[in-house]
Amino acid sequence: MLTYIVRRCAVAAVMIFMVATSVFLILHIVPGDPVEVMLSADGGGMDADPQVVAEMRSRLGLDKPLHEQYISYLSRIVRGDLGESFQDGGDVLANIALRLPRTLELIGMATLLSLLAGIPIGVIAATRRGQWVDRVVGAATSVALSIPAFVLGTLLVLVFALMLRVVPAGGFVPFSDSPTKHLTLLLMPSIAIAVHFSATIARMTRSTVLDVLEQDWVRTARAKGLRERSVLRRHVVRNALGPVITVTGLSMGSMLGGTVLVEYVFNWPGMSGFLINAVESRDYPEVQGVVLVTATLFILLNLVVDVIYSLLDPQVRQS
């Protein structure tokens, strides 16, 4: 088991290095000069004094050869330094640390709601295969998968905030200031994301449970006189959770970059708006920092999923 974990950690480290390199190269290949963008924002634009442009490029280190910038970039990452923002000189890591927990909280709540709904629904559909319950679940999950999260979020705002006025339309209040208000504001964007995710989990759970139900050892357990509920809990669901955990991990990773419009609809101050602003301003350190942190979390999340999956299925460790 330890060998498997070490091997997976080594692969994760290589992937993080590749992501860091790719982000650096892509940002520097894209046409445009961040100095000119910043001067344009200050009213200078392309007519700015060349000496001012040269001084700013020197101050930001953009006048150095590309390979020197790359080496400096990697050395800072190793030290845990993501640099300073070109826009306001703020510490990039501090800016990310302020916004990342908000996005993670949104994803975590959406994942929890999805698991609480998707797994039971999938099990019920599998145990009633071909019955009306199974057909209703199939139709409902198809509809849920076809509705984008930002569209559903807009509908939730329209119905529950504007028409029924039972919840606020959006915004953010720190948990320390008002736990109730914070959770209330968190609920609707989490549901908007969770509906699509729960449909995926329900379908995957149904498929894996049906597969496990056909196994000989399940029929043997029934033949021994075990109650159906006991067979499902002890023999079926546990062995069907491996693929579900894998899909959950991959979906959580994709949600790290897929909450942009949902956060915008509900005015939730997470990573998405921060990244969009950094891209528009050509703020290299901020874009590099956000993408690197997001990719690292995605890779580490998949590492955790692989380890959990290997605990559920020892055969995975031999692959």
Image (tube, grey):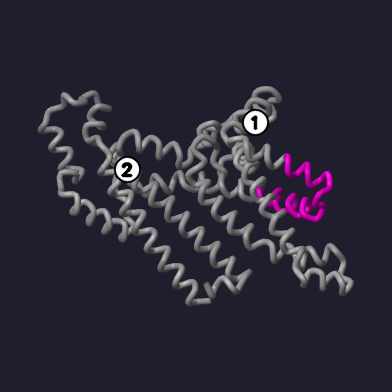
Q: Residues within 10 Å of mark 1 (few under 14, many from 20)?
A: some
**Residue occupying the point 48% across, 77% down:** 3
Marked residue nearer the N-terminal end (2 or 1): 2
Asked if the residue at tag 1 contacts the one at tag 2, i.e. Cβ–Cβ closer than 8 Å, the answer is no
Q: Is residue 183 visible?
A: no
What's the magenta region? 114-139
In the current view of this chain or complex, which residue is farthest to the right? 225
Q: Which residue is mark 2?
A: 90
What amino acid type should be assigned to the residue bearing mark 2? Gly
Where is residue 172? Give x, y as percent.
54, 36
Measured in 3D between alpha carbons, the distance from the residue under mark 2 to the one under mark 1, in whole angstroms, is: 36 Å
Where is residue 54? Give x, y as percent.
13, 37
Q: Is residue 290 left or right of residue 2?
A: left
User: Does the magenta stretch mainly form a helix, a strand or a loop?
Assistant: helix
Vertical order, 260 against 164 (above or below):
below
Q: Which residue is mark 1?
A: 156
Q: Residues within 10 Å of mark 2 (few under 14, many from 20)?
A: few
Vertical order, 222 against 88 (above or below):
below
Q: Quadrant of residue 141?
A: top right
